[in-house]
Amino acid sequence: MKPPARAPRQKMPEQSAEERVKNFREVPYGYPPETAKIEAARCLQCKTAPCRQGCPVEVRIPEFIRKIREGDFAEANRIIKGDNALPAVCGRVCPQEDQCEKLCVLAKKGESVAIGRLERFAADYGLAQAPETPPPAAPTGRRVAVVGAGPAGLTCAGDLARLGHEVTIFEAFHAPGGVLVYGIPEFRLPKAIVQAEVDALKRAGVKIELNAVIGKVETIDELLAEGFDAVFIGTGAGLPNFMGIPGENLGGVYSANEYLTRSNLMKAYRFPDFDTPIIRSRRVAVVGGGNVAMDAARTALRLGAEEVRLVYRRSREEMPARIEEIHHAEEEGVRFELLTNPIEILGDDQGRTRGMRCLRMKLGEPDASGRRRPVPMPGSEFEVELDTVIIAIGNTPNPLIPSTTPDLKVGSHGTIVADKETGLTSKARVFAGGDIVTGAATVIEAMGAGKRAARAIHAQLMGG
């Protein structure tokens, strides 16, 4: 007798493209309880749990999914929180399709279990209930300084506090969250979600000092001299890269970092109810093909741009952005100019952007990244009329901390050299992880680095 047919992967309801392009509210609504239970029932509960091998923070995936299937949503959330300090964040921005879901057994012949959507469901359920604060371990008497309140720093701090250490985060900005607050738009990750996750860490005992620019107000050496037993550096990679083409100094040219940070700081996500002072454009080009490029393009649309082009020098298949983000951008009306490379930004007599000159490209042999190298097509130059250009081609670490910590070894791209498994740097008692070590990567990879470093710091402090 054949087993009953397994339900298809459950879709998550979301705003229509026509509606959402006019607001900054979150696009997906999340699973309702019955849909979550149907999706959870698709899980085979594999004994080997290959999905877990793809999770940088080692969430016990089959266990929490089983609890959702049984209707015990609170326990599902507790299981996730045992390994993941920011589950509501990860359920929204983690590229599960390239990690845990990619290794799901069901993915071999069909569609994987929607692990990310189920994580979001359980985490949101937990946030909606009375907040629980797990009892901390007995105090160890050890003090740890964490520099940077982004994904790596928050994860490291949360894990260390749970182990009984006294943890203080030093954050340069006026609110914790790093890229989660300043870089990712409201329609992908609501500020209230990040704040709720941070509040949970505070209840667990993590202290946060804001407007504290380490390297200026204090150095790493001074933190150690003040009595901190270890320091974790998780300051990310916030220094934008540019193309080095003529016209990048014109008015109307932004890095994606600046554009998205302006949008978040100036509360553009409350537009049109709040009259944000951010400049709104008519014709916009975003250069790049990653998630940040998609975020910038979709933000420009929501701020009223009549036309937004995404200019990318390779084909759609080579785009590093999540499939979901590419799909949403296209649905909302972003025009993709693929196999296209800018060679000059054009200005008017007042020094403002008026357009961009581009070249058509074709794909040649693979380069060091494994993707086929774009090759210019002679005689294919063309111009487009624009008033705003946003450059989204990656970032490098800010040199402030390495420049004020002489015995900290730095790599060729300004990254801090640290052990991959422990985060230990060349300087005793100093650890690092996330984008400051790897260069620009994903939120969950930074969190994984913070988790591994916390484990190593704990072992060192306890004599391991």
Image (tube, grey):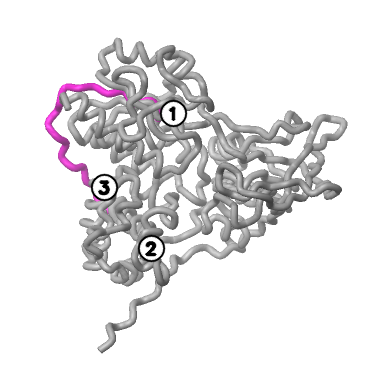
Against 112, residue 176 (above or below) is: above
Q: Nearer the viewer, mark 1 or mark 3?
A: 1
Question: Mark 2 highlights which residue?
Answer: 114
Percent from the top left, x then y, of residue 18?
61, 63
**Which numbered disc covers residue 235?**
1
Name above or below for residue 109 compared with residue 3. above
Residue 425 appears in the picture as rendered: yes
Q: Looking at the picture, how far across and down is residue 221, in whole percent?
A: 36, 12
Badge 3: how crowded within 10 Å, few (<14), some, or many (20+)?
Answer: some
* Disc 3 residue type (three-letter): Lys
The local secondary structure at tag 2 comes to loop
* Mark 2 crowd level (few <14, some 14–19, many ≥20, 10 Å Cα): many
Give the quadrant of the C terminus.
top left
Answer yes or no: do the residues labelled 3 and 2 have beta carbons within 8 Å?
no
Amino acid beneath label 1: Thr
Quadrant in which residue 118 is drawn: bottom left
Q: Nearer the viewer, residue 280 or 460?
A: 460
Please give the name of the residue rendered at 28% of the width and 50% of the height, measured from the top-left corner. Answer: 59
For the view shown, which residue lies furthest in the bottom direction? 1
Secondary structure beneath dot 3 equals helix
Farthest-out residue, front = 365
Give the mark, 3 or 2, whose residue is nearer the N terminus: 3
Give the magenta range.
Answer: 129-148
Query: Is 142 a magenta residue?
Result: yes
Q: In whole angstroms, how far apart are the C-alphas of marks 1 and 3?
A: 24 Å
